Image (cartoon, helix red, strand yellow):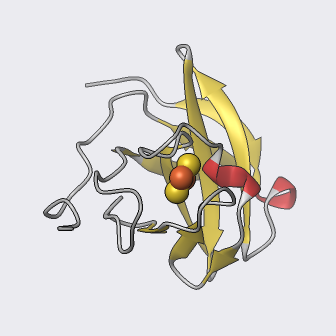
Amino acid sequence: MSEFVKVATIGDLPPGTAKRVELNGRKIAVVNARGTIYAIDDTCTHENESLSEGPVVGEIIVCPKHGSRFHVPTGRVLSLPAVRPVDTYPVRLDGDDILLSPEARRGQGMPHKR
Ligand code: FES
């Protein structure tokens, strides 16, 4: 069982925002999607842009570089030009603290077909 590590607090992350954190050398976007906290790889699978710099709309985060949309709970890519999903990470809350496990789960869903 992997260890959960505090990376932020709820106060850092109002609904509809994302924040980049680093855990074990990986860049991870922690996202507050409609009040639920999720964690996904911060690096867009298209050209390595930071997803946490993009807008959060409901359960979707939009890459600020070319506009690919990713489903935050599953990591699934919803629109081109990215075609591969991003990994997700288990999240736990402890009071106001947001804790992540560094054990990535492979992004779900089929790659977006061209
Ligand atoms: S870098 Fe994200 S869509 Fe191109």
For image coordinates 66% across by 56% down, the residue present is: 65
Residue 5: horizontal and vertical position, in percent?
A: 57, 28
| Observer-nearest of 78 and 66 | 66
Is the N terminus in the top left, top right, bottom left or bottom right quadrant?
top left
The residue located at (51%, 38%) in the rendering is: 100
Furthest-front residue in view? 114
Residue 52, position as x, y percentages in the image:
68, 52
Left/right placement of residue 94 relative to residue 45 reads right
Position above or below: 16 against 108: below
From the image, which quarter does the C terminus lie in?
Answer: bottom left
- Residue farthest to the top, as pictured: 25
Residue sitting at x 74%, y 49%: 19
In the rendered view, would you say 14 is above or below 81?
below
Q: What residue appears at the point 32 percent right and 34 percent down from the top-left corner?
A: 104
Vertical placement of 28 versus 82: above or below? above
114 left or right, relative to 35? left
Q: Position of residue 102 (x, y in %)?
A: 42, 27
Note whether 80 is above or below 87 in the view shown: below
In screen coordinates, is 3 left or right of 24? left
Residue 53 location, x and y as percent?
A: 75, 54
Q: Is residue 96 visible?
A: no
| Residue 13, quarter of picture | bottom right
Q: Nearer the viewer, residue 82 or 101?
A: 82
Judge left or right: residue 23 versus residue 102: right
